[in-house]
Amino acid sequence: MQHTALAAQPDWAQAIKVPVVITLYFWLIKIMATTVGETAADFLSVDLHVGLVGTTVVMTVLFLGVLTAQMRASRYVPWLYWLTVTLISVVGTLITDNLTDHLGVPLPVSTVLFALALAATFVGWWASERTLSIHSIDTPRREAFYWAAILFTFALGTAGGDLAAERLQLGYVLSALLFGGAIAAAAAAFYLFKASAVTTFWIAYILTRPLGATFGDWLSKPGSEGGLGLGTMGTSALFLVAIMLLVAYLTKTRRDAKPAV
């Protein structure tokens, strides 16, 4: 009798709700999702004249609906997981934008606040579960900590990326190179010096947000602002198509699912 790859997995593997085999595809989709989070928020708020508040309300309601479906799922479903990531990216961006544009919170302050919120999430997660590993996301409480951490990484990355590129006037290209170099350093620490897989994963995860945000701004902003002028709609559409193609590939091959043991 033949079994599917999922059926061949042990019960604990089926219960894990997130990708557990971290491949290049994971990082490519993650960076593109962060880029979409930046450009889609701008497209809805500015280009479609929905406004920051209206965009925030619409995207938050949509995100909560998708997150509920993700939390209720009994296993890892690639399209549902990555849709949740993409939407939480947009919401994280909007949280930072609201603090900056509506409440007047300076970017250095919001960067520190989100860093503290993320640190508190990790502390609470560790105190409750004694692990921060993505391979342990097999209970509702652990998944709740996981998504809270991701939300704060997106909000922090948006604030940090804007702080570097705009407030410190480093520009989009230099900022992207700096964040990309930091990610490469984390990868080198893991592969060359056997640093903690959990620590280096979360460092890279945090840094891919400002990398994707600055990359998205560079593609979408007009030349007068240091960008390539592709526009928010063109950039968002390009990366959404790429994300869908990669997610379809992972759904078919399950290369990011735990292999059968």
Image (spheres, rainbow, N blue to C red):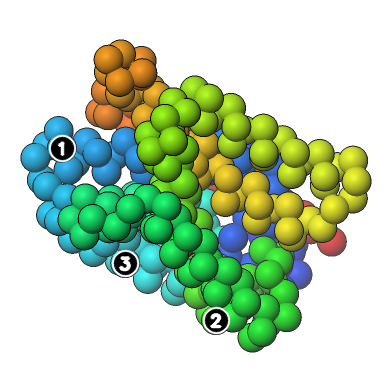
Instruction: Classify the position of the C terminus by image quarter.
Output: bottom right
Are dots 3 and 2 in contact, CB under 8 Å?
no
Q: Which amino acid does label 2 sit on?
A: Arg
Cα–Cα gap, marks 3 and 1: 23 Å
In the current view of this chain or complex, which residue is farthest to the bottom?
A: 128
From the viewer's side, name the closer residue of 247 and 87.
Answer: 87
- Seen in the image, is 107 located left or right of residue 191? left
Give residue 65's mark.
none
Residue drawn at 73 percent across, 52 percent down: 200
Residue drawn at 23 percent across, 55 percent down: 104
Closer to viewer: mark 2 or mark 1 = 1
* Residue placed under numbered mark 1 in the picture: 46
* Residue placed under numbered mark 3 in the picture: 64
Q: Position of residue 86 (x, y in %)?
A: 41, 48
Instruction: Classify the position of the N terminus by image quarter.
Output: bottom right
Closer to viewer: mark 3 or mark 1 = 1
* Residue placed under numbered mark 2 in the picture: 141
User: Which quadrant would residue 241 be assigned to in this image?
Assistant: top left
- Above/below status of 171 relative to 124: above
Q: How many labels does the image show?
A: 3
User: What secondary structure is found at the residue carrying circle 3?
Assistant: helix
User: What secondary structure is found at the residue carrying circle 1?
Assistant: helix
The earlier-in-sequence mark between 2 and 1 is 1
Q: Which amino acid does label 1 sit on?
A: Val
Q: Where is residue 170 in the image (x, y as percent from the top left)?
A: 47, 28
User: What secondary structure is found at the residue carrying circle 2?
Assistant: helix
Q: Position of residue 130 (x, y in %)?
A: 73, 80
